[in-house]
Amino acid sequence: MKQGLETGVNKQEVAYQTIRQRILEGRYGPGHRFIIDELSRELGVSQTPVREAIRRLEAEGLVQYQRYSGVRVAPINPEAYVETLSVLAVLEGYAASAASPHLTKEDLEQLRKMLLEMERALAGMDFMEFGRLNREFHWVTVQRCGNACLLDNIRNLRAKVDAVRRNIFMVIPRRGEESLAEHRRIYELLAAQAAPEEIETFVRRHKLRTVEAFQIWKREGG
């Protein structure tokens, strides 16, 4: 009985992660309609795990039910992106400053290697990989902040940013070079054990520059 339950949970998780990743990668674009039966056959699971996965994605804002047309990938919400990233800027800035005294040599080495990987991704115009590394980089900078509530809020807000699915580096490639330089500076501040206030200010400003780049892009007809 227990084994069957675990199998069901695993199938649901596989369905959830697979569908979610395809949405974030753009394989399922805004407005894409999901046909549960076809999706369950493709994933090799019954319809139940797929429906449960869809419900989770709906809760995150990635998909939505539309009358008469069923389940579709949610449209992009630029306002939600700006609002969420602006709040995330404040939280991640504070978390990075709180975590900075507790970063290990291994953490700093991981950040250094990520910078090299980000350089390669940007040089190869692999913006999806660059975006993934960007998110991982920031998680390393905040994960040792010692505040579980703060980390939970950061996770939740990140999920909302994912729900908007706007990969800023793909729609505004020039932001990638600027962002990479800012990431290098964040690393330098952390490695030098700069004052927490300086780290907090720079990380917050780094996030807000992305907001500003997005707003300019929208005003210019993006």
Image: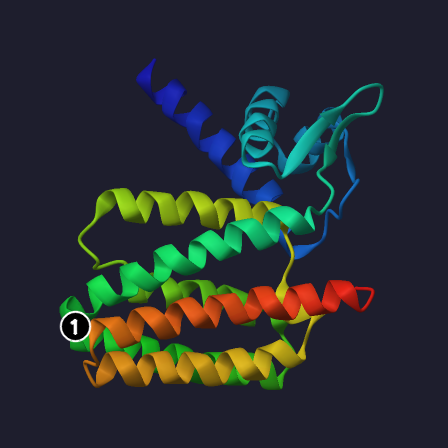
On the image, the x and y values in percent for residue 165 come to 63, 52
Q: Nearer the viewer, residue 25 or 167?
A: 167
Residue at 65 percent of width and 49 percent of height = 79
Colour basis? rainbow
* 55 in relation to 174, above or below: above
Taking depth in this image into account, of 204 and 4 the one nearest to the observer is 204
Relative to the observer, which residue lies in front, 101 or 66? 101
> Vertically, is 79 above or below 37?
below
Q: Tell me residue 39's x, y (percent).
A: 70, 33
**Mark 1 Cα shell of 10 Å, populated few (<14), some (14-19), many (≥20):** few
Position of 64 compared to 200: left or right?
Answer: right
Q: As displayed, is residue 174 above or below residue 130?
A: below
Q: Where residue 68 sits in the image (x, y, percent)?
A: 85, 19
Q: Residue at x 17, y 78 (%)?
A: 105
Residue found at x 76% / y 29%? 35
Is residue 128 shown to the viewer in this render? no
Q: Quadrant of residue 31?
A: top right
Q: Picture quarter containing residue 116?
A: bottom left
Q: Disc 1 designates what residue?
A: 104
Q: Amino acid at mark 1?
A: Thr
Res 181 visible: yes
- Tell me the quadrant of the picture where the C terminus can be found: bottom right
Q: Residue 217 appears at what percent x and percent y?
A: 73, 68
Q: In what element is the residue under mark 1?
A: loop
